[in-house]
Amino acid sequence: MKSIKKIIFVLACCTGFCACEDYLAVTPESAYTDESFYLTATDFETAIGACYTNLNAIFGKNGTGYINTLIARSDECRNSTEIGRFMEASNSTWWSNPWKNLWTMVSRCNKILDKIDGVDFIDPTQKNNIKGEALALRGYAYLQFAWCWGGSPLILESLSLSETYKVPRSSQAATYAQAESDFKQAYDLLPEVWPSTKTGRVTKYAAAGMLGRLYLYQCVSQNRAQRTGEAPTPAMAEEAAKWLKLVIDQEPTLYKMASTYTACFDGANNNDPERVWETQYLSGASAQALELTTYFPSIFIPSSLNLRRGDGAKMGGVTFTGGSGSFRASYSIADSSKYELISGTLDEPSTVVFDKRRDATLVTGLYVDRSAPVYDYFFVKKFLIDSKNFPSAIDYWGTDLPILRYTDVKMMYAEALNEIDYAANKTTIFSILNEVRTRAGLTSVGETELPDYNAVFDCIVHERFVEFAFEGLRWPDLVRWRLAEEKMAEHFALTDEGYDNLAQTPTYSMKKHHYLAPIPYSDIIAYNDESILWQNEGY
């Protein structure tokens, strides 16, 4: 019973294990206590399993997952929500739920790291691996606190609430540094690959890939510097490239890009070489009863789906309708100009063949309870794939969700190389971009199409948009490139996003302070000391 999915199954039976009343509460509210638990290697295997369970909830287990928030925030999603319209207050659950769930995971990881060195393990490698997992998961949390909230308190041990409220919020740089330290320690402690009995755990190369992402999040690109007047930071790009290459050097033994785009999301391919790190779910009614499934793919299924008229078949074969408030694709990504043509012309729609990622991602022409197909609505179907265990109900999905795809590793590597030196690295950059484009059915590009740094940067911005749409990467990409204001202004200039054509003004707009998320109001009140925990400007 050592695989992550089996450990999660056991934990689901342990009601309330390490539950947290407050976002930083550390006292387990169950039969497990420090005196009766954290005594054996088995206890620590169970405890680290609880951290993975929490990761599932953070990332996108249900309708309030962190990935949902990031998707709703960006221009890929039709913005019918307060967060998509940049109208949320500091008490918005869109941000407070991920914040609290991330802190719960930090608390659980801290407890493991506090206790594990005091327990003898028959196998010291097992102890090191569990420590590495706890550090990697905590590093993931602090990475989010850094880029998304602009810094947080750095809680690195189990504390009482009174002690917790004395720990001041750290700067964004210090929070990044903590995530960096955690991932680096994890890299040294984790295995390159787990045995089949432990499939799904974070590996050494997942930690390396996340370090690459961390450095790119801190990198002031040349393009950004040209627009904002900041100083570029090539050293960050060099660090990113160094860690990302560690992952790429494992191709094809451990990692390789999936042969087709749809295979990247098929539940039948859970834990295949395209996925460097992904969440772990189980499918079906029994798993759902134990809260081991994910609802996430169903957030894209409209409640008005007309199954009688074949809408289900167009949405991947679903036999059920979605919940209210389902996500719809925006024209910022669904407009025909956003995907390259493989053949044909827009003047003759019947001849048009687009970038394969468009049809794999989007669907239109659904009836959605109308008498005729509707072609001005676009819905998302890329996650509605499971050729092995297709669900029969809205919350029966067992499809793992990618935290770090191998394609992302390669795309980040190409981006880092471009920041370091376009001329010296263009052959590798073109090779990576063309591998991604070839899978999408597109023609290769080279120096003619991409003659300089800026052309490559613009290509990467576009390719990342269509490649990673609705995977929770678009918003952090726009934030780190400092393109969010520009792209959201373009987005809100669309009629479908509330633009007032008569007054020639957008109804909604992003402000500069929206680059950071609000610290939840409940926690500002709980601390009741702005010198310890203060709100981000503008909220």
Image (spheres, grey):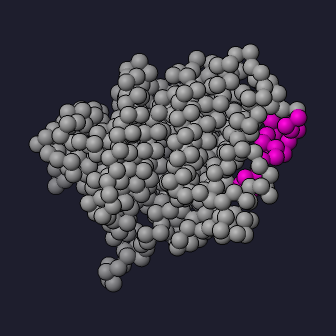
**Residue shown at 38% from the left, 50% from the top:** 219
Query: Is the magenta region chiefly helix, strand or loop?
Result: loop
| Residue 23 belongs to the span the image colors magenta | yes
Q: Residue furthest bottom?
A: 503
Q: Residue at x 21, y 51 (%)?
A: 454
Q: Is residue 411 visible?
A: no
- Magenta-drawn stretch contains 56: no
Q: Is residue 492 above or below residue 49?
A: below
> Which residues are the magenta region?
13-35
Residue 346 position, x and y percent, is 19, 53
Nearest the camera: 325 or 244? 244
Q: x and y percent of residue 384 in the render? A: 49, 40
Q: Residue at x 44, y 55 (%)?
A: 475
Instruction: Using the image as rendered, state which of residue 481 and residue 400 is in the foreground.
Output: 481
At horizontal 70% and vertical 69% (from top left) the residue drawn is: 529
Residue 295 rendering spot, x and y as whole percentages = 60, 45
Image quarter of residue 448: top left
Q: Is residue 109 visible?
A: yes
